[in-house]
Image (cartoon, rainbow, N blue to C red):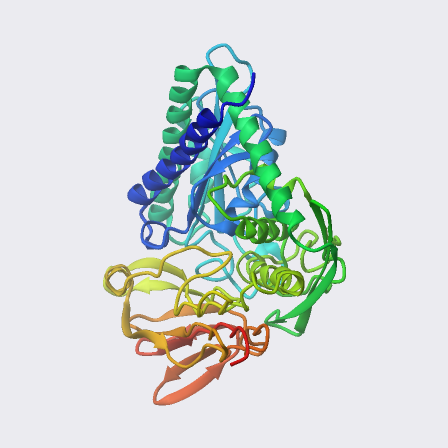
Amino acid sequence: MNVNPILLEVFKNRFAAISEEMGVTLTRTAFSPNIKERRDLSCAVFDHSGDMIAQAAHIPVHLGSMPLSVKSAIENVEFEKGDMVMLNDPFKGGTHLPDITLVAPVFCDDSEKPAFYVANRAHHADVGGMASGSMPLSTTLYQEGVIIPPVKIVEKGEIVRGVMDLILNNVRTPAEREGDFAAQIMANITGVRRLEELIGKYGLEKVDFYASSLTDYAETITRHTIERIPDGVYEFTDCMDGDGFECFNVPVCVRLEVNGDSAVLDFSESGDQVGGSVNAVRSITLSAVLYVFRSLIEGDVPTNAGILRPIEVITRNGSILDAKFPAAVAGGNVETSQRVVDVVLGALAQAIPQQIPAASQGTMNNVTIGGFDERTGKPFAYYETLAGGMGGSSKCKGEHAVHSHMTNTLNTPVEALEYSYPFRVNTYCIRKGTGGDGLSPGGDGLVREIELLSDCEITVLSERRSNPAYGLQGGKPGVPGRNILMRDGETIEKPGKFHSPLKKGDVVRVETPGGGGWGSK
């Protein structure tokens, strides 16, 4: 069968539309503000071996790593029609425990094995563990929440109550969790239906052929993109501020070698895994590399498994970018992933300086707050990542107060926060003057100030509090972020990573970093 370019475009959009519709279903039916308001979720379509065919425009850190979750499900579970597998184990295809993935098979009428798979991943605001929100200052995976290996949550169309009840009995907000699980199940049902309709219209052979052709097409375009990068070796090092305990300025290093239409990225010189929770599993590193190289590609190219084919990623097991079980990894997914992007972009800036922007804020500013809501007498768990400044580039100045790189979520509206949680938002504004100076200045961060209306506890995992977002081509670095606790008239400067009990009336203020500037004035 020969590739028809018109049909290739049709299938590219059909596969992407299925992923997008799954995302709409999940967003519209979810219970938690983190999913329905912030859209901290991702959906994608996979072939029979678990390679990604298409994705929706969701969260980069989810989508690059989700194929490993699908492959883990395939390897560990025998699928039947109507089944769905759930998992979150970072060392069996997951990333960190709050990100729970559901995988569903797509069978043809006469097939014994699935022809395709659909999957979605959503960040749950609490999955148990030592601290509300399940993003603690932990030293081992066991402290971070319930660990779910690949296991059937739906069997032949029926929810497996034993598995569901086991999970719900280990979280602080079971009703909200069950609602979000139901939304994830419906999103996969939507994806399965649409793929069945597609196969019914075109036949399995043609659908499978164009799925394969799309990954080949993405590989070809990626190779052409890499060919335009000058051959050579480019190295760059940046640092994580610390792990929240005893390690500071943990190096993240890359050696990028470009040779023709292929590239090798070697992260072996990065620091050893640490005691705190900023360790990343290998899938996170792969996600960051996929994101950067996809960002280099101009035009509407499908994001799928073909993009990584010309790229070899080398990590050292036991390092901060390829941690060993049972390392604490809650912050690796959200914080260390951003630093991987920063170092890969820093290396590429030496080769193609006009195409690479200065560093963006380089953190997701994770805030989790939990306790009992005095208004309802029920437990609550709030999780949010906060936007910051983007880096300036040769084309334009950096945007203010936006999510960048490995996160693609929205900011939670003030109305949604105050309705759902015992909070009063006192301040929510752009943190003016925090972007780095330059020909194209970096974008400014933001300020979010929350007054607590109930006793609770808080955990903050943030970066770029001591090491600012770098500038490029003579541009200046952005202003680092700050975390502040105000209590009984006293202002307390807090570190980038901290856990603290809070009293009713306490005020938490997070000032996010600015992006780096690009170019000399």
Q: Could one spot residue 450 in this view of the protein? A: no
Up-down relation of residue 28 to residue 501 (above or below): above
Between residue 379 and residue 187, name the one nearer to us.
187
Between residue 168 and residue 23, name the one nearer to us.
23
Q: Looking at this view, name the residue that lies furthest to the top.
A: 110
Q: What residue is drawn where x is 40% and y is 64%? A: 402
Image position of 508 (left or right of 127): left
Image position of 64 (left or right of 447): right
Q: Position of residue 174 (x, y in %)?
A: 37, 48
Residue 162 quadrant: top left
The image quadrant where one finds the N terminus is top right
Q: What residue is drawn where x is 53% and y is 22%? A: 208
Up-down relation of residue 158 to residue 184 (above or below): above
Q: Could one spot residue 76 in this view of the protein? A: yes
Q: Position of residue 35 (x, y in %)?
A: 36, 50
Up-down relation of residue 188 to residue 337 (above or below): above
Q: Where is residue 90 in the image (x, y as percent from the top left)?
A: 60, 48
Residue 182 quadrant: top left
Between residue 157 and residue 443, name the one nearer to us.
443
Between residue 375 and residue 198, name the one nearer to us.
198
Q: Where is residue 382 in the image (x, y as percent from the top left)?
A: 37, 60
Residue 67 quadrant: top right
Up-down relation of residue 62 to residue 241 (above or below): above
Question: How many callouts does the rendering have?
Answer: 0
Q: What residue is drawn where x is 45% and y is 25%? A: 7
